[in-house]
Image (cartoon, rainbow, N blue to C red):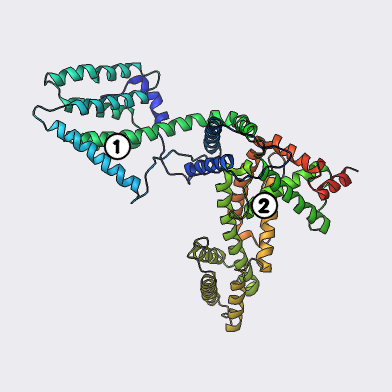
């Protein structure tokens, strides 16, 4: 069936990209689960100043729904590659087995009816009705002509009369359905439509039609998400803030972990200022900004099983964890390369391609460092052996004397020591990474990325990408939750949340 002319200008808008995005739906689900646990947990410790509040089941359900909507809207806004994906039960699971058994019985029943003499079309007509409703749901408001064609060709009362009079040609009905699907589907489904045309048996044909319709539903949902994103970008801050306020109204103590997170950051910043590790802020506003930015950096060193994530950051917890794992790997890579270049000296400085070759070797060997099967001793021993071998080959190739065995052993020992978090070189690299990332959180319009500190140049590109991602998340989070943060930070200063904090702010203001 040819496509309508007034559809052509809009067809491109419906062409969707169904490439897989990085665990995007899982992010929203995880955020919802964590917030629901906060709502439902019977063991929460309520501060004496805020008496417990009885909440009805209806309020809990309404709050959970609001959290789900907020998490989904947040995911669409912050994740430009967000895609809705079909939910598939795990391979070998009971759910998958039950689903397969039910589907087999379902289609067997249809085949049994169609094989009777005369054929019984009761089940088939029900399926046609479902297909009709699905096709109509795909239509845009301007596609009135196509809607009329579907209503006419898939008139269930007429099809029922034809079946009763043994005049129904179910194959013709199926072909109209396929042609209509071809007119409505995205270009990525054209191959699926072609395969449908090659199926002659009715039962396998209807089964395949439903499979393709399920894919088209996902395509249309993702098209709707893409269309909705610009609107959400304009109103996302206000929407998320209002939704969180609704949640806070029902759970007055829902900022308990956020307050603790800011308090610990404040104590850490002030201890650093007292010890001379950091410069003293020039104003109370500068102090509060330093506390807030350092709090965000603390999320990149979070211990999931030990500390509770701040409520205001729950929806981005997965993204912070992902950055944390990347930073841990990059810190080790930078530490190893720093050791190698300090040990080898000027002989390898400036040799083309060497730093990239060594970097790739270390990254490959550390690829599984966050898996249960990772063995640090064996891995770092392998890194030492491999790098010494590559260095020896490179030095020989460029006319230098190869590494002496004693120097090789010393280098291997230094590399093996990096696996300890207390290693001085690793701590130095971690400190420089934190300083570098902090530069991305400094305020100012059109700020350029900060300069890469010494020793981090080999991983500078990766660190800059993480810094940009971090700044986007932090800036959006500040926009949404700034009223809540402002009150909490002021309470820290004014309500004696920390004597050290209060004294520091008074000293600055005086």
Mark 2–mark 1 CB contact (< 8 Å): no
Kindly indicate the quadrant of the structure image that contains residue 158. top left
Q: Is 370 drawn above or below residue 194 in the view shown?
A: below
Count the numbered circles shown: 2
Could you tell me which quadrant the C terminus lies in? top right
Which residue is at the front of the view, 475 or 317? 317
Q: Is 328 drawn above or below residue 220 in the view shown?
A: below
* Sequence order check, earlier mark of 2 and 1: 1
Q: Residues within 10 Å of mark 1 (few under 14, many from 20)?
A: few
Location of residue 417 in the rendering, given as x and y in whole percent from the top left corner: 62, 72
Q: Is residue 318 visible in the rendered structure shown here?
A: yes
Q: Residues within 10 Å of mark 2 (few under 14, many from 20)?
A: some
In this image, 30 relative to 510: left or right? left
Q: Please, what secondary structure does the residue beneath circle 2 have?
A: helix
In this image, 437 relative to 17: left or right? right
Q: Is 194 drawn above or below residue 429 in the view shown?
A: above
The disc placed on residue 211 is: 1
Q: Which residue is mark 2?
A: 298
């Amino acid at each position: 069936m040819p496509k309508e002319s007034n559809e052509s200008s809009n067809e491109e808008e419906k062409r969707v990209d169904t490439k897989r995005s990085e665990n995007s739906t899982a992010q929203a689900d995880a955020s919802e689960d964590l917030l629901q646990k906060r709502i439902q947990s019977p063991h929460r410790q309520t501060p004496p100043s805020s008496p417990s509040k009885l909440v009805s089941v209806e309020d809990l359900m309404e709050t959970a729904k609001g959290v789900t909507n907020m998490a989904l809207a947040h995911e669409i806004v912050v994740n430009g590659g967000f895609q809705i994906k079909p939910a598939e039960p795990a391979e070998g699971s009971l759910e998958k087995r039950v689903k397969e058994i039910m589907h087999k019985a379902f289609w067997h029943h249809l085949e049994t009816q169609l094989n009777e003499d005369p054929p019984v079309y009761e089940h088939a007509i029900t399926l046609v009705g479902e297909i009709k409703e699905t096709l109509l749901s795909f239509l845009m408001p301007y596609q009135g002509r196509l809607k009329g064609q579907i209503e006419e060709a898939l008139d269930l009362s007429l099809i029922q009369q034809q079946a009763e009079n043994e005049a129904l040609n179910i194959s013709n009905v199926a072909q109209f359905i396929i042609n209509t699907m071809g007119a409505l589907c995205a270009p990525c489904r054209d191959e699926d439509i072609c395969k449908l045309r090659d199926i002659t048996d009715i039962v396998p044909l209807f089964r395949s039609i439903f499979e393709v319709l399920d894919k088209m539903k996902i395509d249309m949902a993702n098209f709707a998400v893409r269309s909705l994103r610009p609107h959400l970008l304009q109103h996302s801050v206000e929407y998320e803030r209002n939704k969180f306020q609704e949640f806070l109204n029902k759970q007055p103590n829902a900022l308990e972990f956020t307050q603790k997170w800011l308090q610990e950051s404040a104590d850490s910043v002030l201890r650093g200022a007292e010890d001379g590790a950091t410069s003293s802020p020039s104003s109370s506003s500068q102090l509060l900004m330093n506390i807030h930015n350092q709090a965000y950096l603390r999320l990149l060193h979070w211990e999931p099983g030990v500390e509770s994530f701040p409520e205001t950051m729950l929806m981005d917890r997965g993204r912070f964890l992902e950055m944390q794992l990347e930073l841990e790997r990059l810190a080790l890579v930078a530490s190893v390369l720093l050791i190698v270049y300090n040990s080898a000296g000027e002989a390898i400085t400036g040799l083309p391609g060497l730093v990239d070759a060594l970097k790739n070797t270390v990254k490959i060997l550390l690829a599984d460092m966050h898996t249960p099967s990772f063995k640090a001793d064996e891995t770092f021993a392998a890194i030492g052996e491999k790098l010494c071998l590559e260095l020896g080959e490179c030095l020989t190739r460029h006319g230098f004397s190869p590494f002496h065995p004693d120097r090789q052993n010393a280098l291997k020992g230094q590399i093996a020591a990096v696996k300890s978090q207390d290693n001085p070189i690793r701590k130095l690299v971690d400190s420089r990474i934190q300083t570098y990332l902090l530069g991305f959180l400094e305020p100012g319009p059109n700020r350029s990325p900060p300069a890469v500190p010494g020793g981090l140049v080999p991983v500078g590109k990766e660190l800059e990408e993480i810094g940009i991602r971090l700044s986007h998340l932090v800036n959006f989070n500040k926009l949404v939750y700034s009223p809540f943060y402002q009150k909490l930070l002021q309470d820290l200063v004014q309500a004696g949340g920390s004597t050290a904090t209060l004294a520091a702010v008074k000293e600055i203001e005086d």
